[in-house]
Image (tube, rainbow, N blue to C red):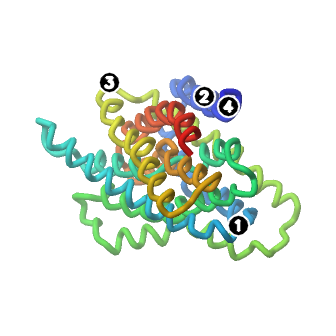
Amino acid sequence: MLDRLVDAYAPLIGWTGLGIVSVKFLPTSFPYWLGRGLYWIGVPIEIFALARQTTFDERAQLAPEITIGSLLLGLGLGWLSLQIWQKLQPEPAAPPALKGSLLLSSMLGNTGFVGLAIVPFFVSEADLSWAVLYSVTQNVFGTYGLGVLVSSYYGRQGTATNRWWTQFRDLLRVPSLWGFALGSLTRSWQLPEVVEISLHGSIWVVIPGAFILMGIRLSQIQGWQSLKLALLPAIVKTIVMPTIVGIAITMMGMRGDPRLGLVLMSGMPCAFAGLILAEEYNLNGNLVASSIIVSTLIFLAMIPIWISVY
């Protein structure tokens, strides 16, 4: 198992390290444009390809409902932890950008970049569709649905543009939702081989870009405060959520690889997509980056526990 984890996390360490090292040689605007490029081009192409290429098991149709439930659970737990944290602070209320970042980190897991790289090592190919559906549902409903609404609301709080129709407009403009819709509608279309190969290989551009962006943001973290606060969403995301999801689906009668796959997916570290949303909506990128690194370390320690329990 250790060898498999090393293979899966080698790209994470390498590309993130490159981002940390190269930040001194890059223009200050580079992370902003990298984040926008991933948001508007890279991630939508990847989701388009995923929607076209995945064959879904009929038994796994329950996975989207479980995913939506876990997303709402993460949002609720994040909001609760934020209220408790604010009660314990002598300082004034947290700024909207920090609130939005904490909620995003508590709710969204890295089901695409890390989840679909890790879960296949521990789940049979026949049951892998549960994990794929979880990832797709989180991207469509969570990251670029509910996540955009949260980001838009807190990113615009205190401005004249913070209205419900503004959040709805931002939701309709999300490129990844259009990518998923177009991918689903064109599954029966035979595209030129060069296009299919390019779509399949898009992940090798998107993942390094996301890791580099994380490395840049990690290098910009100042002080212990961001890392200390990051413990809240990291614990919610990698310990509390998978524990509750595991108990719930066990009570529903689920066993074996489907259960393990869903528990692992629900406990993935905080999503790199949170960094992309933070860049797009001017949230607290330091907190998101800190949450990613803290939750990743916790997740590595939790994998053997979830495997032994489920």
Numbered tag placed on residue 223 in the rendering: 3
> Residue tagged by mark 1?
56
Q: Residues within 10 Å of mark 1 (few under 14, many from 20)?
A: some
Q: Nearer the viewer, mark 1 or mark 4?
A: 4
Q: Nearer the viewer, mark 3 or mark 2?
A: 2
> Residue tagged by mark 4?
1
Q: Residues within 10 Å of mark 2 (few under 14, many from 20)?
A: some
Residue 41 in sight here: no
Q: Does residue 71 appear left or right of residue 1 in this picture? A: left
N-terminal-most mark, 1 or 3: 1
Name the residue at 54% across, 64% down.
140
User: What distance separates the C-alpha of mark 2 from that of mark 4?
Assistant: 18 Å
Q: Quadrant of residue 307?
A: top right
Q: Specify the amino acid type for callout 4.
A: Met
> Residue tagged by mark 2?
13
N-terminal-most mark, 3 or 2: 2
Q: Does residue 197 appear left or right of residue 120 in this picture? A: right
Residue 208 location in percent, x, y? 64, 39
Residue 211 location in percent, x, y? 58, 37
Name the residue at 16% across, 45% down.
93
